Amino acid sequence: MWRSANALNALLLVAVVICALSVVTSQHKARKLYIELQKQKELAQQMDVEWGQLQLEQSTWATPARVEKIAARQLQMQLPNSGQVRYIRVEPNGRANQQP
Amino acid sequence: MNYAASAHPDITAELPGWRATALFVALLAGLAGLFGRGTYLQVMHDGFLQEKGNARYSRVIEVSAHRGMITDRNGEPLAVSTPVESVWVSPADVEADSRQVKQLAQILGMDVEEVKNRLFDTSHDFVYLKRQLPPDQAGKVASLNLSGISLQREYRRYYPTGEEAAQTLGFTGQDDNGQEGLELALQERLAGKSGSQRVIKDRRGHIVEDAGSLHAPKPGSDIVLSLDRNMQHLAYRELESAVRQHKAKAGAVVVLDARSGEVLALANYPAYNPNNRTKISSQAMRNRAIADLFEPGSTMKPFTVATALEIGKVRPDTMINTEHGVFTVGNKQIHDSHPESMLTVAQVIQKSSNVGAAKIALSMEPETMWQSLADSGFGAQTGSNFPGEASGKLRAAKTWRPIEQATMAYGHGISVNLLQLARAYTIFANDGELKPVSLLKLDAPAVGKKVFSDGTARALRDMLETVVQSGGTAPLAQVAGYRVAGKTGTAHKLEGGRYINRYVASFVGFAPVSNPRLIVAVMIDEPGNGQYYGGLVAAPVFSKVTGAALHALNVPHDAPLDNVIAPPEDIVKEEV
């Protein structure tokens, strides 16, 4: 009687100690993972910010006013007047029909 | 050895019994004290203590949420918030030698003396050294590693289109809250709500555990406007060159999608650069197309004629006696600059005859005319929800005297804003249906309100097309390859209740006539170069904007490319 009770107690004690230790380790692991998560979140946010800045930059470089200025001044381009434009109309039967 | 014997037996005997009792009581009292204190701390004072304990490792951190982006209808950004750093100082903690101060001033581009003053101004706990630094400068400040100087993340709004849409978009203040324009109107939806979170930090300041979120952060929503960036650019470019060419005070252009009532462009000149608002005048800040009222002049005539057509008072070919250009109502005279004896109703529109319009108006009951103008959206808000929108003035029909009814027929004694006027022309472009305007992109065209019958709207379209043809007031409004229609307006300005010799030139029209897609309204305020007629000042802007916009939208031609006739030397001018 006493013997088996003692054995059970000892067993339970070991189990409790193991549980306690595993709580500690999993807590530690959880914290480590959380730090990792936090880092990734921060990275995501940084990338988000960068994405916004790149969008802004792209949009600023591509403003119609700037494109127009470069086309007209640097590349010496100009809008064709109506006499210089040929319109090609696609008929319903798929044939192209050129008009002056 | 017998120790007992060597001790003094009498001393042992003399030890009184009360000492043991006293000691026992004292120990008991101590124990009771401990228990009491323990109970007090554990049961009654535990909240405070736990708080103190948490304070050692748990922190509440702010989770910032940024303001939503504003984009045009194609997703091109028009207003974007991006983080910047502000440098702040806690003067009591500053430790910096003069070399470091000099370095700091150099990075910030500030005067050394001023930096010194702010750094060592111990009367404040918190001083901003410089706000909204670009990230690279902020990085340099951080690398100086001075104690007492910290960076704070803030958001700054950037507007890639610069002045082109400045008054329409508006701007935000230092704290990224909307102050003007759509930024203000859409504040609720754009604004982000920063949240807070409780976390556990370790000794090195790393967050190791999330102890629960207090308020979840809510980033602002992105908003898609109805504006088209390319069209906005076209409108602004042509407006700017016209205002400069005619040495005008100001001007505005509105481009509407004729089918849906969406605003595709809304440009004002003069303008300002919203990215750099150090020099900004209230003149440049006004969104004239929405917030300013003017007397529209002859651009109102189509509504007079349409009302008369609708109730069957006239037909397009009804002859009107235009009295050789002088018509007396009460004790006032109405003039035409191109005196004719007889004109058809269609010609009244084409040649913009004031006498003809006045006569048509006087053939109707004031209530009928008032109702029709009110139904066309005059004297009421357009539904754009733009802050500071002026609704215009349309006086009650009961108060109209005959002369007022006559002048209202050609747009005097009534005030409108340009957006309202452009919107009213959706009636002619949409077979009699008035569309609500929208500055936000719509998924489906808004349902309008039928004001005139299909027949009336079509008859007016035909009449308005003759305005740009030979014999009309606006041949300069023609567009190669497209049929266009519209109406000129030239009006004296009112100052202190009197008409003065300064003018507002306007043109409102739509294209292509066979299937209207765009409505373009142009208003030029006080052209100062000798020319002031709507057909000479505003119509060319209409032509350029409409032509380029139709090309940009890939609208098929509905006229041969050689449809543009050279305007005659002497364009028919309207009386103002």
Image (cartoon, coloured by chain):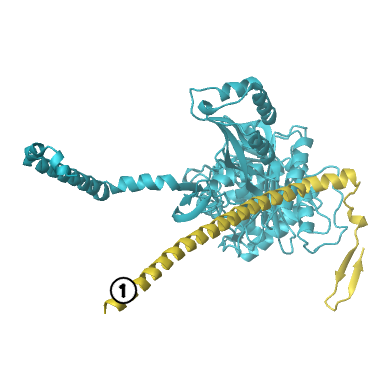
Task: State which quadrant residue B156 falls in.
Answer: top right
Give the number of marks.
Answer: 1
B373 left or right of B535?
left
A36 left or right of B254?
left
B477 left or right of B70?
right
Query: The N terminus of chain B is located in which quarter?
Result: top left
Q: Identify the residue shown where x is 50% and y is 23%.
A: B122
Give the colour of chain A.
yellow
Task: State which quadrant residue B406 falls in.
Answer: top right
Q: Nearer the viewer, residue B304 or B482?
A: B482
**Residue carrying label 1:** A6
Q: State the image coordinates of residue B469 (x, y, percent, origin top left).
A: 80, 53
Q: Chain of mark 1?
A: A
In the image, residue B279 above or below residue A75? above
Query: The C terminus of chain B is located in which quarter?
Result: top right
Q: Nearer the viewer, residue A30 or B233?
A: A30
Residue B1 in view of the camera: yes
In the image, residue B360 above or below residue B282? below
Q: Identify the residue shown where x is 60% and y is 22%.
A: B116
Q: State the image coordinates of residue B473 (x, y, percent, origin top left).
A: 76, 47
Task: State which quadrant residue B533 falls in.
Answer: top right
Furthest residue toward front: B1
For mark 1, give the secondary structure. Answer: helix
Q: State the image coordinates of residue B460 (x, y, percent, origin top left).
A: 68, 58
Give the colour of chain B.
cyan
